């Protein structure tokens, strides 16, 4: 048996399998698995924030004390009064949905967000239907 043939095959094979192959596997894990997992986790956090934002909006809309003390600007008042944190979360979530989800999911978000909620007809079935619709559309993309 020719040892030069063994060394000419064994050494490159050892280098490829022992040194280069782990780099290729780690690169594949990074590009194929880790990035996809990160995107799913990011979209999942947007889904949770959307549910929280709509729940906060409904809670604020059904708070009698908050609705009684509506702020006005130049004679105009909001249909639904909410805390600043609620509006901030709703605007942030809406922006993220518009960027990272399909257009029909964003339209469903806008429909749910803009649904007028009244303390007189609580629980508001239209809002609840729109809220579940947007959450289902967001969950479909996970």
Image (cartoon, rainbow, N blue to C red):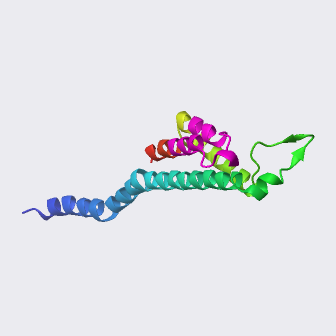
Q: Nearer the viewer, residue 108 or 59?
A: 59
Please report the residue visible at 63 percent of the width from the left and 53 percent of the height from the top.
53
| Residue 4, image quadrant | bottom left
| Location of residue 50 in the rendering, given as x and y in whole percent from the top left corner | 59, 51
Extreme left residue here?
Answer: 1
Q: Is residue 68 left or right of residue 106?
A: right
Please report the residue visible at 23 percent of the width from the left and 60 percent of the height from the top.
13
Please report the residue visible at 62 percent of the width from the left and 50 percent of the height from the top.
54
Please report the residue visible at 66 percent of the width from the left and 56 percent of the height from the top.
59
Q: Is residue 11 above or below residue 39?
A: below
Q: Which residues are magenta?
A: 106-133
| Location of residue 108 in the rendering, given as x and y in whole percent from the top left corner | 56, 37
Q: Nearer the viewer, residue 119 or 32?
A: 119
| Residue 65, image quadrant | bottom right
Q: Is residue 40 above or below residue 11?
A: above
Quadrant for the N terminus in the image: bottom left
| Residue 76, image quadrant | top right
Q: Verify whether residue 125 appears in magenta.
A: yes
| Location of residue 57 in the rendering, given as x and y in whole percent from the top left corner | 67, 51
Q: Verify whether residue 124 appears in magenta.
A: yes
Q: Is residue 24 left or right of residue 142?
A: left
| Location of residue 131 in the rendering, given as x and y in whole percent from the top left corner | 56, 45
Image label count: 0
Extreme right residue here?
Answer: 74
Question: What's the magenta bit mostly, secondary-structure-wise?
Answer: helix
């Amino acid at each position: 048996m020719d040892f030069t043939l063994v060394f000419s095959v064994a050494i490159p094979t050892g280098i490829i399998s022992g040194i280069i192959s782990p780099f290729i596997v780690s690169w594949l894990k990074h590009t194929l698995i880790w990035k996809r997992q990160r995107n799913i986790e990011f979209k999942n956090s947007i889904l949770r924030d959307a549910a929280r934002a709509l729940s906060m909006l409904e809670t604020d809309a059904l708070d009698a004390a908050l609705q009684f003390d509506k702020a006005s600007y130049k004679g105009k008042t909001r249909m639904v009064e909410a805390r600043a944190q609620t509006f901030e979360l709703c605007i942030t979530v809406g922006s993220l949905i518009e960027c990272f989800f399909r257009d029909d999911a964003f339209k469903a978000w806008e429909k749910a967000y803009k649904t007028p909620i009244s303390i007189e007809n609580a629980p508001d079935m239209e809002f609840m239907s729109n809220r579940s619709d947007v959450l289902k559309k967001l969950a479909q993309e996970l």
